[in-house]
């Protein structure tokens, strides 16, 4: 069985989309895969409630309890490893990971970013797209590398930038596409793991 561990920091809407896709798409039977755990760096992350309601084990590793990023990443990795992951999925996990952590899961960790990479890595992507006068924005699923938002692209979806768009309106349209492409990209990747 291929175990998927999902990391979140907040509401977990992408995590929920992945869980639903796994349930509705029969990942356990069809892909020999399951969501083994949801891990958060915040005890108050609302996504943990959804995961528990689905019967998925959860864990919290509070980054504020660690003096260094390396110490946090080491404990996070120990927690993840306790679920024997084939794939680590970052779904709104708002921590920059150390190179050692990334190397540990090289080729087995994916992320979704709310821009059409390589454009607009980092934060405030929707406002930056509007400020740049982009006609399209979107989302990218990519493998995680030590360079932020830079790994090999697995999937992308574009949405038009509409006249009068705000960053929030654009973000909402992009998020609907994230919920579609992220589960598909994971399902496509699983057979190769």
Image (spheres, grey):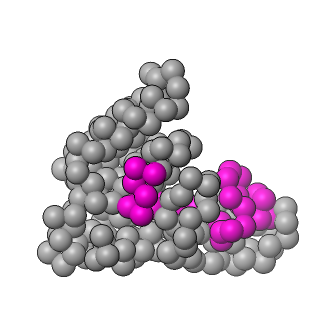
In the image, residue 80 lies at what x, y percent?
31, 44
Relative depth, front residue between 37 and 24:
37
In the image, residue 61 lies at what x, y percent?
38, 32
- Taking the spot 51% from the left edge, 76% from the top edge, the residue there is 155
Q: How many marks?
A: 0
Image quarter where the C terminus lies is bottom left
Residue 89 makes an appearance in the image: no
- Residue 147 magenta-drawn? no
Is 166 positioned to the left or the right of 14 in the image?
Answer: right
Q: Does 105 appear above or below 150? A: above
- Taking the spot 84% from the left edge, 62% from the top edge, the residue there is 131
Asked which quadrant contains residue 169, the reply is: bottom right
Q: Does 167 appear above or below 96? A: below
In the image, residue 6 lies at what x, y percent?
36, 53
- Taking the spot 17% from the left edge, 71% from the top edge, the residue there is 32
Is 192 positioned to the left or the right of 98 in the image?
Answer: left
Relative depth, front residue between 174 and 74:
74
Report the span colored magenta: 103-130
Relative depth, front residue between 191 and 11:
191
Asked which quadrant contains residue 90, the reply is: bottom left
Asked which quadrant contains residue 149, the reply is: bottom right
- Taking the spot 49% from the left edge, 32% from the top edge, the residue there is 70
Residue 119 makes an appearance in the image: yes
Image quarter where the N terminus lies is bottom left
- Residue 105 magenta-drawn? yes
Is 118 positioned to the left or the right of 106 in the image?
Answer: right
Is 130 positioned to the left or the right of 98 in the image?
Answer: right
In the image, residue 83 lies at what x, y percent?
22, 47
């Amino acid at each position: 069985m291929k175990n998927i561990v999902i990391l979140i920091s907040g509401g977990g809407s992408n995590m929920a989309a992945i869980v639903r896709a796994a349930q509705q798409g029969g990942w356990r039977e069809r892909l020999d895969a399951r969501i083994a755990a949801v891990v958060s760096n915040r005890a108050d992350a609302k996504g943990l409630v959804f995961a528990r309601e689905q019967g998925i084990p959860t864990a919290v590793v509070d980054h504020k309890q660690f003096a260094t990023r390396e110490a946090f990443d080491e404990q996070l990795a120990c927690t993840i490893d306790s679920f024997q992951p084939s794939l680590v999925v970052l779904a709104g996990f708002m921590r920059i990971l150390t190179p050692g952590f990334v190397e540990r899961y090289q080729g087995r960790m994916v992320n979704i970013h709310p821009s059409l990479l390589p454009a607009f890595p980092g934060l405030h992507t929707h406002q930056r797209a509007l400020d740049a006068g982009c006609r399209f924005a979107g989302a990218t699923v990519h493998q995680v590398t030590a360079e932020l938002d830079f790994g090999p692209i697995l999937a992308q979806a574009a949405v038009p930038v509409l006249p009068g768009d705000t960053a929030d309106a654009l973000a909402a349209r992009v998020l609907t596409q994230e919920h579609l492409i992220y589960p598909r990209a994971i399902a496509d990747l699983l057979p190769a793991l």
